[in-house]
Amino acid sequence: MTPTDLKRTLESLWNTRWPAFIWGPPGVGKSSLVTQLARDRGMPLVDIRAPLLDPTDLRGIPAVVGDRAEWFPPSFLPRAGAPAGVLFFDELNAAPPIVQASLYQLILDRRIGEYQLPDGWIIVAAGNREEDRSVVFRMPDALANRFVHLEFDANFDDWRAWAVSRQLHPNIIAFLSVRRELLHKPNDSRAFPTPRSWEMVADILDAFPSLTAAEEAIAGTVGVGAAIEFASFTRDAIAAEEIAAIIAQPERAKLPSKISSLYVLVNHMTRRSAEEPIRTACGQLLTRLPIEFATLLAKDLLRSFPLFVKDANFKEFVIANREAFR
């Protein structure tokens, strides 16, 4: 299930009382998706790392009140009257079976002992699969039967839309546009490509003074093979000086012919779309770039700077190529 499909399914499922468990390999963005969906709905999110719990943590501690003992729930559980939100148990199946068993009543009955989960709160959990070579315990059937189980896989188109909105380094987006299979490619090394590790590489590129200085760190993030391919791609692509020349004279500057350089150019322009001179240049480039890259630039600009829809060149481009925007 792609991120878009999963978000759509969760949004509908959250209108019921039934909890969901998201299964997927490490680094594909399971936790981020739940966090983003809660943020989009304006709902608070309580993120509980299940492996850090003891079996008694959810029940709380007893205290003598008058002539009887009462249980006081932990502070991380929402109290009565709290606005509707999301109770998220991350890495649930990495918790020992006895901790998983302590969740039976809360997951199904929305209560544990004397504690009652407030109305409007949604329960979601996530975890890695056994085949992902992660530290996981088999989920007891009694707990598994309390969830709606959803499989989550990395999807390049969804990741690219997110990366553009997040303004990741343009060379990362451009490289993976050409080598999509490297978005997520587990292997036997300590470091391997995942959506999460590529986000780390993007931050590394922004922090280091040059690609050469960053190469060791990149190899230690996505693995040696992917790092070598990325470095080769970057050195072979359009240079910053050439991009600057295009921005200065977008109506007549020489445009790159290589696909890799066109991807870099488009993503570089999109990342800087908040700058007015860049948007002006983009409007003129829409008529000069190959149609598939002009369309890509137009769509990315709408994600990064929605007001670009008012640009006169953009309006003309959409009218002339309306089929590409359906």
Image (cartoon, helix red, strand yellow):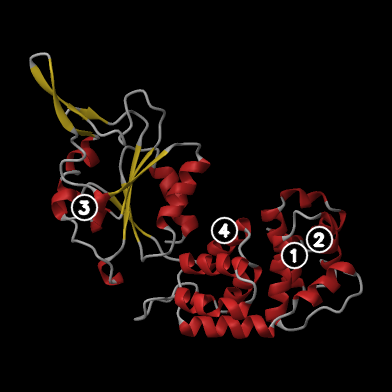
Query: Picture coordinates of residue 140 (x, y %)?
Result: 15, 55
Residue 193 in picture, x, y percent from top left: 46, 74
Which label sits on residue 144? 3
Q: CB of mark 2 within 8 Å of CB of mark 3? A: no
* Labels 4, 2: front one: 2
3D distance between C-alphas at marks 2 and 3: 52 Å
The first of marks 1 and 3 along the sequence is: 3
Q: Which mark is residue 162?
A: 4
Q: Is residue 304 visible?
A: yes
Residue that badge 1 annotates: 269
Q: Secondary structure at mark 1?
A: helix
Separation of residues labelled 4 and 3 (CA atoms): 31 Å
Which label sits in the foreground, 2 or 3? 2
Closer to us: 117 or 213:
213
Residue 325 horizontal/vertical position (percent): 70, 59
In this rendering, position of residue 206 left or right of residue 65: right
Question: What amino acid does circle 4 point to?
Answer: Trp
Give the mark toward the camera: 4 or 3.
4
- Does 105 appear above or below 127? above
Disc 2: which residue: 278
Question: Is disc 3 placed on a helix, strand or loop?
Answer: helix
